[in-house]
Image: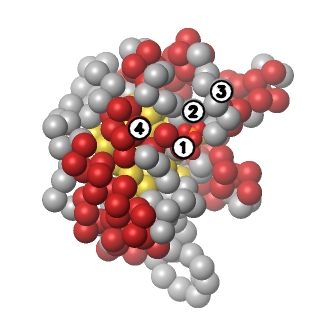
Amino acid sequence: MGERKPFIAGNWKMFKTAREAMETATALVNRVSDVTGVEVMIAPNFTALTAVYDVVRESAVRLGAQNLFWEAEGAFTGETSPNMLRDVGCRYVIIGHSERRQYFGETDQTVNKKIKAAVEHGLAPIFCVGETENDREAKKTFSVLDKQVQNGLKDLRSDDVAMLVIAYEPVWAIGTGKTASREQVQEVHNFLRSLIEKKYGNELANSIRIQYGGSVKPNNIKALMEMPDVDGALVGGASLDADTFSKIIHFQ
Ligand code: PEP
């Protein structure tokens, strides 16, 4: 896996009040204080970011947000800008999660604007891509992913892409209990890396981290992480409990 430090991230979605998020973050910080070879991030709800940052700031656990808006400020009721996220301690931001594409009208074009805004403000995007079950059955997995990557990364320079993490999240495996087989995951990760190589060259392709997401659990993480192009995981449901998430982080 070369230079790529494994990266395990938790997406807490619309779960946990600020107090609950603080409690889980505190338990997690305690359980992973021995971990050095894996980067760990949690993305709580916006309302919990400040409280959770207070808990993780002295630890190795990084803070991420689940979304952003691309403008720096303005009359955009209900939205949150990249600099506001930086201000409360975020290093990462999840962009283009399938739930946002499915329920909130997120498109490859809005994803592209958000990625640009994130990198411009020093936030590292976790850029989510993934095919639906219909796409896979129709043998469109690679063409769908190719389109998401080309459009999502449109006009981005190498320096910007160097900040990026890609998360391959097959829509049919998110929150469903169905995990893609590790051979399916490896095949797609290898394809995604080859797309980056074609656009940005070998060095960047070899250094960019590609996470897998979709029903990752303590009992399947090790097998997934053994695949050469799997550099980590984006974990939903199983990241909500500190003990379970800590087991995933201690996969080695
Ligand atoms: C996710 O939301 O990014 C995800 C992968 O969810 P789950 O682990 O619950 O499938």
In the picture shown, does residue 132 fall above or below 31? above
Q: Position of residue 94 (x, y in %)?
A: 49, 52
| Residue at (24% x, 26% y) in the render | 3
| Mark 3: amino acid | Lys
> What is the three-letter code of the residue carrying label 2?
Ser
Q: Which mark is residue 215?
A: 2
Q: Which of marks 4 and 1 is nearer the N terminus?
A: 1
The CB of the residue at mark 2 lies under 8 Å from ligand 1: yes
Q: Hey, what amino acid is under mark 1?
A: Gly
The residues tagged by marks 4 and 1 sit, at their Cα atoms, a distance apart of: 10 Å
Residue sitting nearer the eye, 181 or 28: 28
Q: How crowded is mark 4: few (under 14 residues within 10 Å), some or many (20 or more)?
A: some
Residue 92 image offset from top left, x and y in percent: 38, 54
N-term mark: 2 or 4 = 2
Which residue appears at 43% of the width and 28% of the height? 218
Which of the two discs, 2 and 1, labels the residue nearer the N terminus? 2
Q: Does the residue labelled 1 lie within 8 Å of ligand 1?
A: yes
Asked if the residue under mark 4 is in contact with the one under mark 3, i.e. CB atoms within 8 Å, the reply is no
Q: Dot 3 corresponds to which residue?
A: 178
Q: Nearer the viewer, mark 2 or mark 4?
A: 4
Q: What is the C-alpha distance between the residues marked 2 and 4? A: 13 Å
